[in-house]
Image (spheres, coloured by chain):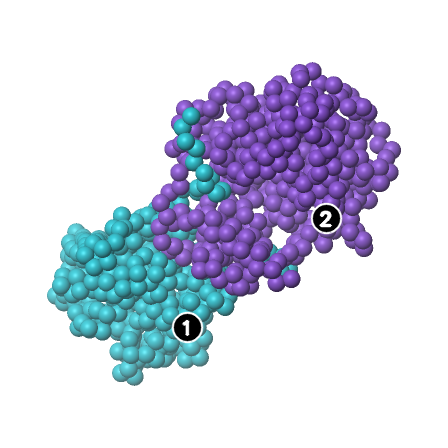
């Protein structure tokens, strides 16, 4: 197979896929779940339960009422302890439903909780979208955009391709890799369902070449699914970025400030395809996901099937405990993940992995003056000039940052990763992007 | 539990550093250093040592006693400036001129603008041009190379450079054939390996290209910039050669004389003073090539690349402001 990739920029960090050979195992239910309300991009759903309510596994506990919002379901059977603020991965306190788990799962009505493979896909477009909406499915790659909204194309727009993101370009993370190996049948069904909903004839699964087993497995399976193909990609970060993946797979460039549908593409993650399959064929809401727990000094890097709301500390415990001298606990991969203030933060729909960084690798190097080497410009996948944007942000010149297209920055971190002077480029870019965005919104 | 560190992503770093880049440049210059030692013996070692030591000393002294800021001589940039400065002078240059040159290189060329990363002009070239204008006699009396273990063939100790012979001959109204017949004119093969009169580092094109390839592989320089300079020089000088081959020498002559390779591969590619975008680098390279030939053919100096690079350095900010990299989503592909 001829390998493809995106043209502009990119870096190649060390892969460290420590948990690639660890099969997905079920993490036991904890005694208490903390289920944050705002787990999706857009408006958080409105809670339907209050203190003292009994809830069943899969029961709706908060309804997404806004256009861009997602339903939320109880990940376990038990009693609502309280609806109160709890710290999230960013360290902010946000409303969450605390559930005391009673032990055995008692599933809400109508949910098929078996592993049987359902291949009868006689659903209409509307049925699929409704079921996806009911199940509270969001993009599981990390962006957490409500999937039912993605499946409803804006009027007048037509999709040519459904692109499935199996790239997993972040170092260390392996949850998508394991899903592709262990749930390929289900993923294929999920893709077919999304193809029906979007009315597209072609779906391409993009997988980086460092997962040859997944590529071979999916390619063999795709033979019996007309319209679905698998494309192997060169290993290059940030290929999992939506715009980079579209460029790599179909050589189209999403214009600045526009969505993929502008170039006839819809992009979805392999994990999302699996969730769509379970939602549509089994009425199963999104209450669990695969999470990688990994780190160089961790005893057992693993991939766990985890209920939403499980404290991260439980995963660390199951993987052999927090190693002595840990410097950082990162929610996500090393390139884009967030360093967390405490391990009691819960797993949410968008958590793909937890990375434990040893202390000696956790501190930044001392910054030196910019030597104008232009490496940041060379590696920027959006064709921006990070050194310039960082400088303009530092000077608070937000009219100029807007002109220099700071809003196109995807915050992939390639510039800072590559900077020989170890400058905190992305820190400034993030700040500049935030302020510039504020300025643009105030203008309206 | 120990305290957790909180910082923004990315949480890993590519392990590239300023000092790694600088010492890669020094390493790339080693073949040319060895060639200069072969041809000039102890004199080459003397010039290199004085130049590097003086550059590092002045950077340290200025940071410690004038700026009173952090000391950064460990980053290797002063070493690079020192080696390049040494490569730009004759092997018999008196030590005190070299020390003054090092003071101008570091003090004026670099520290007066705020140190590493802030200098608009290539510091070593600032030092070289200062010496060339202030000490024209010493800076243009070129020792005749005496390869190690070889007998000196003539009694003369110094002689003109190939470009010097050319300039003088043209000025005297001689044809190219007459000039090439001059006994002092080095043969082609000597120009290629560096067996000719000249500065320490302008000698061996082969050694310089070797180091250049090493820097390209290590991604310290982009190949497009030196190639743009070399191609421009070849084409532009070639046009005049085709018009009047007895008045304008063939373009290959220009490539292997007068420090063109040294300038194109090591001086013009200085990260700090060259443009950042690829388009910018190519325009900058073409500009250097054109100016070099203009100075060589019609200017007062036989060599031209030092002035050409300094002039184009001045355009770098303008080039950076005008030529932006291609943004993603601005479809042109």
Secondary structure beneath disc 2?
strand
Q: Which mark is residue B290?
A: 1
Q: Position of A132 compared to A400: left or right?
A: right
How far apart, in angstroms, are the residues tagged by discs 1 and 2? 48 Å
Give the residue furthest to the top: A104
Give the residue furthest to the front: A51
Name the spot of residue A67 as percent of width and height, x first: 75, 46
Name the spot of residue B117 as percent of width and height, x first: 35, 58
Quadrant where the C terminus of chain A is found in the figure = bottom right
At a point 64% along the width and 46% down the height, the residue shown is A242
Quadrant where the N terminus of chain A is found in the figure = top right
At a point 40% along the width and 38% down the height, the residue shown is A363
Mark 2 highlights which residue? A265
Foreground residue among B52 and B272: B272
Q: Position of A186 compared to B42: left or right?
A: right
At a point 42% along the width and 67% down the height, the residue shown is B317
Foreground residue among A354 and B232: A354
At a point 14% along the width and 67% down the height, the residue shown is B156
Is residue A330 visible to us here?
Answer: yes
Task: Determine if marks 1 and 2 fall on one subunit.
Answer: no
Chain B is which colour?
A: cyan
Secondary structure beneath disc 1?
helix
Q: Chain of mark 1?
A: B
Chain ID, purple in image: A
Foreground residue among B38 and A86: A86
Q: Chain of mark 2?
A: A
Name which quarter of the figure residue B55 lies in: bottom left
Name the spot of residue A379 as percent of width and height, x first: 50, 50
């Amino acid at each position: 197979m001829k390998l493809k990739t995106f043209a502009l920029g990119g870096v190649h960090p060390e892969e460290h896929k420590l948990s690639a050979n660890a099969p997905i195992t079920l993490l036991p239910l904890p005694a208490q779940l903390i289920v944050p309300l705002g787990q999706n991009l857009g408006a958080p759903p409105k809670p339907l339960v209050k203190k003292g309510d009994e809830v069943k596994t899969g029961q709706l506990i908060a309804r997404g009422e806004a256009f861009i919002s997602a339903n939320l379901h109880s990940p376990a059977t038990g009693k609502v302890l309280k609806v109160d603020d709890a710290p999230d991965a960013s360290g902010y306190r946000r409303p969450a439903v605390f559930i005391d788990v009673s032990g055995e799962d008692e599933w809400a009505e109508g949910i098929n909780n078996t592993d049987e493979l359902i291949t009868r896909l006689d659903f209409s477009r509307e049925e699929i979208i409704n079921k996806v909406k009911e199940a509270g499915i969001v993009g599981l790659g990390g962006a957490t955009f409500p999937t039912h909204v993605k499946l409803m194309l804006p009027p007048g727009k037509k999709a040519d391709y459904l692109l499935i993101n199996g790239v997993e370009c972040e170092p260390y993370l392996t949850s998508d890799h394991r899903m592709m190996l262990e749930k390929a049948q289900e993923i294929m069904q999920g893709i077919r369902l999304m193809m029906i909903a979007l009315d597209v004839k072609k779906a391409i699964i993009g997988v980086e070449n460092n997962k040859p087993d997944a590529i071979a497995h999916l390619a063999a399976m795709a033979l019996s699914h007309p319209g679905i193909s698998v494309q192997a990609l060169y290993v290059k970060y940030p290929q999992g970025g939506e715009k980079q993946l579209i460029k790599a797979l179909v050589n189209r460039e999403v214009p600045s400030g526009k969505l993929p549908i502008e170039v006839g593409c819809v992009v979805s993650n392999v994990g999302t395809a699996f969730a769509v399959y379970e939602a549509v064929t089994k009425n199963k809401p999104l209450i669990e996901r695969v999470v990688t727990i990994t780190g160089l000094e961790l005893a057992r890097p693993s991939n766990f099937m985890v209920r939403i709301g499980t404290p991260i500390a439980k995963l660390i415990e199951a993987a052999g405990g927090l190693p002595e001298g840990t410097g950082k606990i990162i929610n996500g991969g090393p390139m884009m993940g967030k360093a967390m203030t405490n391990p009691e933060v819960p797993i949410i729909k968008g958590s793909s992995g937890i990375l434990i960084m040893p202390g000696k690798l956790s501190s930044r190097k001392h910054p030196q003056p910019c030597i104008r080497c232009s490496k940041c410009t060379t590696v920027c996948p959006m064709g921006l000039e990070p050194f310039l944007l960082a400088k303009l942000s530092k000077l608070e010149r937000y009219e100029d940052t807007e002109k220099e297209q700071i809003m196109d920055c995807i915050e992939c971190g390639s510039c800072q990763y590559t900077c020989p002077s170890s400058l905190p480029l992305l820190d400034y870019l993030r700040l500049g992007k935030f302020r510039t965005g504020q300025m643009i919104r105030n203008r309206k | 539990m120990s305290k957790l560190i909180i910082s923004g992503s990315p949480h890993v770093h590519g392990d590239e550093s300023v000092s790694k880049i600088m010492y890669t440049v020094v390493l790339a210059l080693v073949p040319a250093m060895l060639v200069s030692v072969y041809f000039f013996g102890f004199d080459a070692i003397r010039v290199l040592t004085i130049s590097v030591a003086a550059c590092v000393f002045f950077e340290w002294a200025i940071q410690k006693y004038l700026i009173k800021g952090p000391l950064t001589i460990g980053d290797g940039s002063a070493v690079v400036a020192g080696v390049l400065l040494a490569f730009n002078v004759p092997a018999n240059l008196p030590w005190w001129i070299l020390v003054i040159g090092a003071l101008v290189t570091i003090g004026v060329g670099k520290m007066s603008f705020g140190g590493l990363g802030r200098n608009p002009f290539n510091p070593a070239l600032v030092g070289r041009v200062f010496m060339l204008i202030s000490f024209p006699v010493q800076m243009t009396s070129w020792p005749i190379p005496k390869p190690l273990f070889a007998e000196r063939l003539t009694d003369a100790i110094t002689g003109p450079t190939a470009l010097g012979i050319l300039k003088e001959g043209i000025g005297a109204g001689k044809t190219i054939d007459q000039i090439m017949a001059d006994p002092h004119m080095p043969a082609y093969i000597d120009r290629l390996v560096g067996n000719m009169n000249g500065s320490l580092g302008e000698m061996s094109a082969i050694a310089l290209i070797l180091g250049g390839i090493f820097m390209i592989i290590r991604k310290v320089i982009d190949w497009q910039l030196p190639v743009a300079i070399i191609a421009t020089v070849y084409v532009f000088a070639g046009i005049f050669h085709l018009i009047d081959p007895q008045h304008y020498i063939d373009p290959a002559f220009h490539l292997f004389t007068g420090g063109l390779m040294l300038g194109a591969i090591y001086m013009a590619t200085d990260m700090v003073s060259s443009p950042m975008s690829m388009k910018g680098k190519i325009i900058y390279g073409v500009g250097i090539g054109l100016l070099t030939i203009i100075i060589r053919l019609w200017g007062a100096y036989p060599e031209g690349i030092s002035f050409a690079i300094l002039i184009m350095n001045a355009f770098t900010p303008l080039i950076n402001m005008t030529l932006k990299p291609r943004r993603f989503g601005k479809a042109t592909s």
